[in-house]
Amino acid sequence: MIATTRIASGLLAISFAGCIVSSVAEDRDVDIDGDAASDSGAGHDAGLTDAVQTDTRRSDAARADGATGQSTPVVLVHGYLGHASDWDAMRAGLAERGRDPARLFAVELGNTNDSIIDLAGRLQTFVDGVVAATGSARVDVVGHSLGGIVVRYWIATGNGGAHVATAITVAGANHGNDNACATELLGASSRQLCPAYASAGEADDDIQVLLNGDPDSADVDETPAGSDPGHPIRWFAYHYVQDLIVLPTDAECLDQSSRGDCSAPVNRQLDLDSTSHTGLISDDRVMDLIAADLDP
């Protein structure tokens, strides 16, 4: 009876997971049978090879970096089941708003069912390439959905603290995601995000605890300044209040004193109609915000 129950529960979870994955794919308008689940670690140089030269614009972060007359490179990090190409509209939009398209890069993380630890390692490798290619010691980084917590883990545990000027999470799964509980059987990243607001031992590898501490106290700095006290990292968390993918939606907020607290100045509330979770990164209103936050 116990074995039968476990099998039935597993089949139910697989069925529910299929519904969630199909929902995400429909929202993304992509083929879920493509390379997202099999292309682990591939294509990391995509953003380095297809940039186009244009006029440059000086930013405060670039001046701090010492890159005369050039804007700080921007690295865009996609979400679950995503690809670097998800950012094509954003790259075009930021170029229209004055950013140098030759310094806009989108990483291909590969299989997003892999561990957040592995995904952060791939991000670090990609950023190392951007730094080498541009000669800029610092980058701005924007993470969408799962990409948001990948960015945060990289900053907290890798060399991101030394490289990042501005960090933006867009509908990021910063405090986990209850929807990830439906896809736990698909890979490690879902088990690390389920449940939202996980306490010690509740989710795999305690990544949420490392980044957020106890969900009901402000015992961890969720927006670390980085390793250069002269140029602390500037943080922004975009909270999409109509989100149906990251739940509860307040898990997208940072600097929470207790679960559900979105009152910190770092948080921007996106009360937007006529868009969706994945549509945010091609929405002109979000592009306006990102362009302003990257280059104050």
Image (spheres, helix red, strand yellow):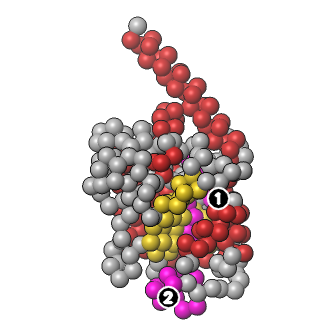
Q: Quadrant of residue 90?
A: bottom right
What residue is shown with label 2? 63
Q: Earlier in the sequence, mark 2 or mark 1?
A: 2
Q: Residues within 10 Å of mark 2 (few under 14, many from 20)?
A: some
Where in the figure is residue 198, as x and y percent of width and height? 36, 42
Q: CA distance from mark 2 to mark 1?
A: 27 Å
Q: Depth check: 292 or 70 in front?
A: 292
User: Residue drawn at (65%, 85%), measured in percent from left and top?
Assistant: 56
Report whether 209 appears left or right of 239: left
Magenta part of the chain: 60-84
Which quadrant would the C terminus be assigned to in this image? bottom right
User: Residue drawn at (45%, 11%), measured in percent from left and top?
Assistant: 4
Local secondary structure at mark 1: helix
What residue is shown with label 1? 281
Local secondary structure at mark 2: helix
Q: Is residue 137 magenta?
A: no
In the displayed structure, 56 sits above or below 218; it is below
Q: Is residue 77 magenta?
A: yes
| Residue type of the residue flagged with mark 2 | Arg
Report whether 155 appears left or right of 252: left
Where in the figure is residue 25, as x and y percent of width and height? 67, 42
Q: Depth check: 164 or 114 in front?
A: 164
Q: Residues within 10 Å of mark 1 (few under 14, many from 20)?
A: many
Where in the figure is residue 185, as x and y percent of width and height? 49, 33
In the displayed structure, 177 sits above or below 107; it is above
In the displayed structure, 32 sits above or below 145; it is above
